[in-house]
Amino acid sequence: MKFLSHIVITFLLIIFLAACNKEPDTPKGLSELEHHYYAVFVPNNNTGITVPRTQTALVKLPVQFYSTFTRPYDAVANYAVARFIDPVTTPPTPAASPAVRGVDYDVVDKNGVVIPPVSDTTYSIIFPKAVQAMDTIYLKMRNNPAPGVRKFEIHILENITPEFTVDKFSTAFRRPITIN
């Protein structure tokens, strides 16, 4: 019995020593991905929201910027206003009554001041020093008296530059918005 106890203890000791965490000889990350970041909507999904046209409070769309570094440059995440495409129809079709920027809604800053787009439909969020952070896209409803439901989407876009890439998740890159 004593011999069996020694064998069991020895076996457990070998398992314990073999299970010790040893630092792998592999690098911590790939050098080609050191300047690759992600911007996604929070919560991490593509779920739509419905907003009353008479809403006076700003509509807030939180955006998470993922990074593990501090860099000498500012990372820029781009987003665009797009027509709502109904994914349920086959083939997917644009909404019959799309919302119009400046008529149904405006893209604004946290104080409600209209932000000019970088291009016709594209806007930017700047993340200083590429540090992980949360920011918010703000929308202001214009209380358009025209009857009917209006729809549009906000899409986070890829931004590929020689210095960095801001990418998106397929599960959280668009936010469909319905204005009632």
Image (tube, grey):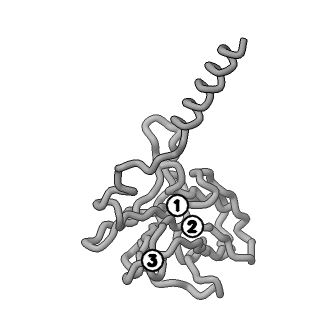
State the SS at label 3.
Answer: loop
The residue nearer to you, when weighing 36 against 180, is 36
* Picture residue at 52% right of the left edge, 52% below the top: 95
Which badge, 3 or 1, comes first in the chain's sequence? 1
Q: Position of residue 6 (x, y in %)?
A: 65, 21
| Residue at which label 2 appears | 63
- Distance CA(mark 1)–CA(mark 2): 5 Å
The N terminus sits in image quarter: top right
Q: Residue type at mark 3: give it.
A: Thr
Picture quadrant where residue 72 is located: bottom left
Q: Residue type at mark 2: give it.
A: Val
Classify 71 as above or below 152. below
* Picture residue at 50% right of the left edge, 56% below the top: 173
| Residue at which label 1 appears | 40
Which badge, 2 or 3, comes first in the chain's sequence? 2
Q: Position of residue 155 (x, y in %)?
A: 48, 61
- Distance CA(mark 3)–CA(mark 1): 19 Å
Label 3 Cα neighbours within 10 Å, binned few <14 / some 14-19 / many ≥20: few
Q: Is residue 50 left or right of residue 45?
A: right
Label 1 Cα neighbours within 10 Å, binned few <14 / some 14-19 / many ≥20: many
Q: Nearer the viewer, mark 2 or mark 3?
A: 3
Q: Residue type at mark 1: give it.
A: Val
Q: Position of residue 73 (x, y in %)?
A: 37, 82
